[in-house]
Amino acid sequence: MTPSKQPRFVLASASPRRLELLAQIGIVPDEVDPAALDETPARGELPVQHAARLADEKAGAVHARHKDAVILAADTVVALGRRILPKAEYETTARRCLAMLSGRRHKVIGGLAVTGPDGASWRRLVTTSVKFKRLSAAEIESYLAGGEWRGKAGGYAIQGRAAALIPWIGGSYSNVVGLPLFETAQLLRAAGVMAK
C-alpha cells in the first residue's frame, strides 16, 4: 500500500529559526511565504490575546494566497506580567528589555495557527516560564556587544549566549526559540503533514 500524498505545506514566517526547528523534526515546507503584517499590539490587548490574534491573522493572510496548501503561522510574545516586550530593533530597546528581565521570571507565549486546504483550522497557545539571573551592567553590555538581540522579542535569544544568563525554564524550550515543536507536530499531523 502506498502512502497518501501529503498536501502542499507553506510556512507563513520569515524566521530562519522556525525553519531550522521544523527541520529538526523532519518537516520541510514546500514554500516559505511570510505574512508581513503590522504586529503592533491592539490597545489593551493582553499578551495571550496578542499571540493568538497574530498567529490567526498570519495564517489567514497566507491561506488567501495558497488555498490549496496547509499553512503554519506562529507568533512569539515575551511578556512581563501584562506587558508585551518589543522585538529589539535597536540596542537601547534590547538594553531596556534586559534590565526589566534581570532577576525576574517572565513568560514566552507561542501562538500557533494551522489552516488546511479545506479551510479547517487548528489553534494552540503554549506558555513557557523563563527566569533570568540578576544581571550586572557589565553582563548586559557584554551580551549586547554580541549582537544576538537584534530582531528578538524581549531582546534575547535563549539558543545563544543568553543561555548562560537563564538558570531555569518551565515548559517548552523550543517555544522560547520560536516554535513549540511538540504542539506544532500535533497540529500539522492533524492537517495531514508528517515528517519525511
Image (cartoon, rainbow, N blue to C red):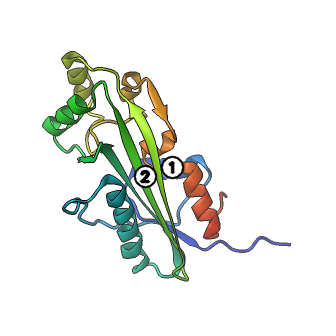
1 and 2 marks in contact (CB < 8 Å): yes
Front in this rendered view, residue 115 or 127: 127
Identify the residue at image location x=46%, y=60%.
112
Query: Quadrant location of residue 117?
Result: bottom right
Q: Is residue 145 left or right of residue 34?
A: left
Residue 158: percent from the left, percent from the top?
40, 34
Please provide percent x and percent y for residue 153: 30, 45
Q: Is residue 194 left or right of residue 177?
A: right
Q: Is residue 105 left or right of residue 89?
A: right
Residue visible at 19% across and 19% down in the picture: 137
How many neighbours does mark 2 have within 10 angstroms: few (below 14), some (14-19), or many (20 or more)?
many
Amino acid type, residue under disc 2 in the picture: Gly
Q: Nearer the viewer, residue 102 or 31?
A: 102
Asked if one can make out residue 34 in the rendered structure from this viewpoint, the answer is no
Residue at numbered disc 1: 180
Q: Which mark is residue 110?
A: 2
Above or below: residue 142 compared with residue 24: above
In the rendered structure, which disc, 1 or 2, sits on the residue that comes first in sequence?
2
Residue type at mark 1 is Pro
Q: Within the image, what quadrant is residue 55 found in?
A: bottom left
Determine whether the residue tagged by mark 1 lies in a helix, strand or loop: loop
| Residue 62 x/y as whole percent | 39, 73
Q: Can residue 46 be seen in this view?
A: yes
